[in-house]
Image (tube, helix red, strand yellow):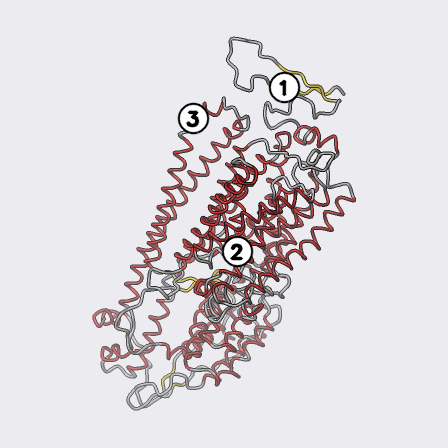
Amino acid sequence: MASSLSHLLLLIKPPSNFPSAQNVFFLGTPQPIASRPHSRPFFRRKLPTKIPFAITESGSPKSLDPDPKSLLQELAETFVLPADYFSKLPRDLRLDLNDAAFDLSNGPVKDECGEDLGEILLNISRAWELAEASTSAALVSKLPVMVDSLTDGNKSALGKRLISAGRRFQSMGKYGQGEQEMIAKVMIRTGKFLSARAVTTVTSAEPKQETRTLKFGELQVELTPDKAYIGAVIGLLFSTLSWGLSQGIESIPESSLQYANDNALLLAKSLRGALLALCYSSTLLSAFTSVGLLLLGVQLGSKENMATSLNCSASELIPLLGSTPNASAAATYICQQFGAVASKLLDTTYAVDNTYLLFSAYLVFAMQLGFAMLCAGSVRAKNTMNIMLTNVLDAAAGGLSYYLFGYAFAFGSPSNGFIGRHFFGLKSFPSQSGDYSFFLYQWAFAIAAAGITSGSIAERTQFVAYLIYSSFLTGFVYPIVSHWFWSGDGWAGAAKADGNLLFGSGVIDFAGSGVVHMVGGVAGLWAALIEGPRIGRFDRSGRFVALRGHSASLVVLGTFLLWFGWYGFNPGSFFTILKSYGTRGSYYGQWSAVGRTAVTTTLAGSTAALTTLFGKRLLVGHWNVLDVCNGLLGGFAAITSGCSVVEPWAAIVCGFVAAWVLMGLNKLAAKMKYDDPLEAAQLHGGCGAWGLLFTGLFAAKDFVNEVYPGKPDRPYGLFMGGGGKLLAAQIIQILVIIGWVSATMGPLFFGLHKLNLLRISTQDEMAGMDLTRHGGFAYVYHDEDDGSNLPASFKMNRIEPTNTNTPTPNHQHSTMLESTV
């Protein structure tokens, strides 16, 4: 330590104007504002040129915080700006201002600075984000008033945050904003004075790992080299798994698909290439991520070693300075510079969690392919093209509506508890409350809700109705619900920023059993009720008639794709992975919670699938793969709420009950003559509601406190000894979602029905929308080509092969439709 510092002192020359120990030490003489070419006339105020420090006879500081009130008062004066000053800044400088807001209030600001000061800092950062200069000035002026009530720890924490934010203003000043340069100097100088007590005079015996606290939404993360290495190993394993899956798919020869008995496999042939592309891209992305994390771990390790070697101790520096005048003050100044360097070493760590969130978003978006295959296999062949097109439409229309309105309504902070009101069209984005990767992830969730609804009204709905309801659901209905329960400003969220939680717990809907699945399911319920059942679904006596989908192969394919995507849906909802919980050793943290969430998801789905398998065997006397697939998805929909806060054994209970909920609701639907081709309302709405109740019953105390920190006495599951408050909050969520979606989507579908924009004509429904709306069938031949369901205006002509020596596939004859009109 002494050697490294002695070499450093050869490069660092103390200021020549250090006074003697009996005199006064002055730090910093800022250039007068009037001499700067970019200063504006209204801001030309001359600041005090020197701030005194009293030094004792021995040369040690008598007080490193001689007059904090005057320092903060000076800082408040520098923020007296015109009301439109921040709003007129160029875009690049606005981004720097947002970064300053983040640095001022990131992490556990209320824990470090105290409740009152923390609240003021949060409000100042929001004012900077919204470019409200007058509000900022009013809030900064409160700091001198309350400084006397702060502890030394609070002052030190405030000082560090002022230094960090001040360096952002310093960056702004380099681009011609003279006022920002002056603000930066005053802010950094004040921060150094206040944080002087944070400079330790005794170095701990065992150096800590170099870490940096990052903030993504309401969650925080700490990154160390060990965690980067763990992430690299996970990425390598996932890359290997993706590569093995691609080899398995590639081993299926195309010739085996060409003459398959099931005509739907002709579509699977074309999907083979798409799946290979998906698997190979996953392999490459995982490999690159793994290598990046490995290199980052090595880099952080070297930075950690550097930081350890530069760990500054003023008591050790003083002897090295020898007879330098005011050696103690010089040592303190040098250590402050060391701290500033250390704070810059881990800026690159933002990329790690951003990559994790982006990869999760890609997985969730891949679920759209699963929805498309599931829907295509669950409808009759004559409507395959139509249902596939609606799935594409959900993503496309939802993308624009969520960009223009949805994200702002959901996460436009600061806002009230009901609806967001900023970031329309991603204006003033990114910000402290979100980044582009977060937007992409939330958009993937929004279109998932719209995809659920489309399954309920398949085979009988006009194309324009899909366009209208999909835009409305993703742009308004769903975002409002997600704001209530997921935004830091929402009235019922478990991570509400002000800590005023519903029933002391808030609603725990971690990945969206209610926010996503119930919203989509209840919307589909109203659509199907208003539209009525498909033609032929019930006979004249009202008995249920099965209209099975045309391809079990596509249903199974879609189910596995959804299963794969659910590992981004549930574990990805942590947003970050490199966060240490600090309660069970250095190898336990959010990365372990992510793994546990994937396990609970798997167990719930697997249990529901097996329960459905044997349950349907007892009820109907045979094994049905389609029912098993729906049971599996019902288990996933149920566990989505509590996947991060329940024990693995509880997930088995969740899946078991979810299977019986789904089977029971299907029986009730048949009795009530309710027609839902994909059982979407029963599966997503019913099982999603059960998932919310399940969380209120089985949420574990330790896991709740890890995932939602900051409130140790937070209620947890009723059956786990946590009382009934969490269960009450979950029941409230179920009721408000049903009420909200019914009040918005119900009138929308009823209005479309009255305007004859909802349901297709009887003739179109009998013929199939592929033929009447999309120019032909999805397949060359299907079992409905006998013409029995076609209108009289269409004539079926069978085309026989001309060369009898040429082998033909199992579907030996194709058909051609000729209009007699």
Q: Is residue 145 left or right of residue 775?
A: left
**Residue position for label 3:** 253
Quadrant of the rendering where the C terminus is positioned: top right
Dot 3: element:
loop
Against 483, is 368 above or below? above
The reply to whether residue 733 is visible in this rendering is yes
Q: Residue at x 51, y 82 (%)?
A: 144
Tell me the distance, in whole angstroms, between the alpha carbons under discs 1 and 2: 49 Å
Mark 3 surroundings: few (<14), some (14-19) or many (≥20) residues within 10 A: few
Q: Residue at x 47, y 47 (%)?
A: 607
Q: Is residue 789 left or right of residue 623?
A: right
- Nearer the N terminus, badge 1 or badge 2? 2
Return the residue nearer the eye: 164 or 439. 439
> Disc 1 vs disc 2: Cβ atoms closer than 8 Å?
no
Q: Amino acid at mark 2?
A: Ser
Q: Which of the two discs, 3 and 2, sits closer to the camera?
A: 2
Against 128, is 225 above or below? above
**Residue position for label 2:** 641
Residue 711, image x, y percentages: 48, 70
Dot 2: element:
loop
Mark 1 surroundings: few (<14), some (14-19) or many (≥20) residues within 10 A: some
Tell me the distance, in whole angstroms, between the alpha carbons under discs 3 and 2: 41 Å
Q: Amino acid at mark 3?
A: Pro
Residue 643, image x, y percentages: 48, 55
Tell me the distance, in whole angstroms, between the alpha carbons under discs 1 and 3: 27 Å
Question: Where, by quadrant of the figure, is residue 339 drawn?
Answer: bottom left
